[in-house]
Image (cartoon, coloured by chain):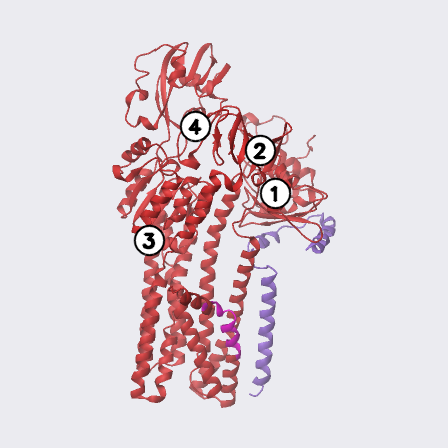
Chain colours: A red, B purple
Amino acid sequence: MPLPDAAPGGPGVHRGAETATCDHCGLPVPAGLIERGESLQFCCNGCRTAWRILHESGLEQYYRLPERRTAAVRASGRSFEEFDHPSFHQLYVRSDAAGLAQTDLYLEGIHCASCVWLVERVPRTIPGLVSAELNLPRSLVRVRWDPRRVGLSEVARLLDRLGYRPHPFRGVRPEAVRRAEDRAMILRIGVSGAIAGNVMLLALALYAGWFTGMEPEFERTFRWVSLALTTPAVFGPGWLFFRGAWAALRTRTLHMDLPVALALGAGYVRGAVNTVASAHGPIYFDGVTLLIFLLLVGRFLQQRAQRAATDSAELMASLSPATARVRVDGAVQEVPAEALLPGMLLEVLPGDTLAADGTVLEGRSEVDLSLLTGESRPVAVGPGERVYAGTLNRRSTLEVKVEEAGETTRLGRILQEVEAAALRRAPVVRLADRLAGGFVAAVLVLALVTGLAWLFIDRSRALDNAIALLIVTCPCALGLATPLAVTVAIGRAARAGILVKGGDALEALGRPGRLVLDKTGTVTEGRTTLVVWEGPEEVKSLVAALERDSTHPLAAGFAAAWPGLAQPEASGVAHTIGGGVEGEVEGHRVAVGSPAFVRGRAREGRAGAQDGPVGGAPGDAALTPVLIAVDGEIVASAAFGDPVRADAATALTALRAQGWRPELLSGDDPRVVGAVGDALGFPAAACRGGAGPEDKLRFIEEAALEGPVVMVGDGVNDAAAISRATVGVGMHGGAEACLSSADVFLSRPGLAGLVTLTTGASRTLRVIRRNIVFSLAYNLVGASLAMTGVINPLIAAVLMPASSLTVILASWLSHTFEAARE
Amino acid sequence: MSVIFIVLPLALIVVLAAVAAFAWAARRGQFDDLETPAIRMLHDEDERCGEKAPEDEEEEAGS
């Protein structure tokens, strides 16, 4: 494919002798890739492909956009053929009357305006693709195409080559339900806002007339019009609160809707009676409509913030692979995991996650069970042995016969347990809701006392004063106090990389208590790393050369430990599964592998090499020993392990200082757990190992009986425990099941986020308490005014928004997560 | 001042129209995504506008 001669002259292009910037993404081109004499330079093949695609489809205008994506294009090069599979269509694709198909895809790498431009112009390059509409904040593209003219896989391949890797969007809830809910809420706010504004205008006229005098016919008209406007507000948008209060009464739970409904009902009924039966007496319609509007806005904001966090978790769930390579008559096909049936033959490449339970027919490899069981060391498998869905193949290709697929796999059963555990969880009772009960009782008693007292003072004003008290003590600010503080906190937490799915979780995290931590992947890094090396420097390059082309985790560990090491060529490399690797490097015979493997090939060499970490160092239970022999002599030893996260010790100290009681609960070998726990200052009683997913769930269930318990984990094996805990926290890099069952998700690696979370949560709780004190103080003033009979509708109308405004300001000005981030 | 008896209903009709328009917009999904359309309108349509028109029609027919 010849390149067009003329360069587009993108803004970042300048060509010197030694430096060049990529003509597609604008990043510097690595020195080795600069092509002298060429007018076009690219930093990678991905960018070159993307550039070609854009030019061949007449989309050069992309390079004239003011803001462009500055990231090298990393295409996965996958075929995406599973996107055309019938079961994929059944799951993710909808068809309309005109025969067009439609689906939502989650795109990686979407981040600015130029992405919108590019993605939405993709239909011009593929005939049959009708439209692509991108939702920038959610990175979701809605594509509509004609299935008779083009396959979805072709669209997916093009998006991938442009650097936007597509994934089917697997929303937890149907998109339509959620959209309908959102729209209904917006509609409620709009209607109640319009009504509140107009009723307040009328109220202003009435108050003015109250001071200056007003002709009775106008007054009557205004009162009747106010009633006519308030009625739809109460029975339309405001009905939400009555429904909530009724539900709370029926289930005998406490909810903020209860006092709200009481005040709204009393105000509306009294106003209506005063309008219809007499030309005088307070009507309260302005207060009632404003209240409905403000409370709906508060509720909407809260819903939105929680929605944003849930969205991000859902999108991350979409990232995990949901396909499997099935071998049919010798040909390999990618199909969605949901379409797998027992008896099918799977080809599992190294680095792939198994999609079903089954038996290995061919191949030997090592599988990583850490997400499923918490076991930190890979397990060797061979023909006839069982492998499980959700585990990672680390070493070489396996042929697996499917025995259980979908819900009947071990993973599927754990997931069912996760759901069941979530249902059994006791809800966190919010501070505001807990106050609601006492609040209602206090208000009713006060109203009764006011009414009775005024019966003796002035019969005619007894009822009005009692009702005035009910209305003026409406917990408007109290109803806003929690949602606003929580909304602000959730928004700021998201900027700090912490996704909080529910405000109640934040409240529960504000009070320190038991904190149960998983080990593998939570306290430790969850990957194999070189922790000990005893041997001469020059051997390192020999080992690196030998391990370069291996996909074994230990090889990756060597590569990560010595970046940038010069590597000579290795020849005659031979792998032994469960043993090691040997070959010829620079004329030396080199063997690297398990002690048994290497000792079988070499005699003991340099003194001390073999009694290094392999001998009897403390904590060696957690380590995998490796010996290195050169020319038949053991010259070096190394040990691999799952290192404790760099920030774990600091984070745990901070958590303990806050009053949390951390404990370790792991599926790994008890000795390994003990060694890690010891290093981090856990008392021996607080370290539990060998706990399977079911044991973890049972442990959390028992702990939850005694009081609130927080569970932090990353694997499928933690998911049930996480969903049963008072608050579940999922770690960065965790399994999908763990993400969806956790209340809080840390989207940045490390345990430092946990400290930010607890600090922020306790600050949020403090803001909530302060807001509640403010609004109760206002209510106290209002109540005493009503009881002494000096209240009038004007004072009530001023008092109510004033208290709400105080709470809103106090919430916005509060430092919850922002200060904690420093 | 009795003009108020005409102006007030008129004002209410205007309010009703505004609420109806809002409801229509909300139901059509105008408030679903508040970020992307703002960016989309900044992109100049290029010389290929003519070619895109039939696609737009097709889109309308499909929905």
**Residue A379: mark in rendering:** 4
Report the front residue among A193 and A91: A91
Marks 1 and 4, the one that precedes in the sequence: 1
| Disc 4/disc 2 C-alpha distance (Å) | 24 Å
Q: Are marks 2 and 3 in contact (CB under 8 Å)?
A: no
Give the position of the N terminus of chain A as an image quadrant: top right
| Disc 4/disc 3 C-alpha distance (Å) | 40 Å
Q: Quadrant of residue A538?
A: top left
- Structural crowding at the residue carrying mark 2, measured as other residues with C-alpha within 10 Å and reported as few (<14), some (14–19) or many (≥20): few
Marks 1/4 same chain = yes
Q: Residue at x 38, y 81 (%)?
A: A792
Start-end of magenta stretch: A228-241
Marks 4 and 2, the one that precedes in the sequence: 2
Q: Amino acid at mark 3?
A: Gly
Residue A231 lies in the magenta-colored region:
yes
Q: Amino acid at mark 4?
A: Val
Task: Give the mark toward the camera: 4 or 3.
Answer: 4
Residue on which the image places disc 3: A510
Q: Amino acid at mark 2?
A: Gly
**Residue A343: mark in rendering:** 2
**Residue A88: mark in rendering:** 1
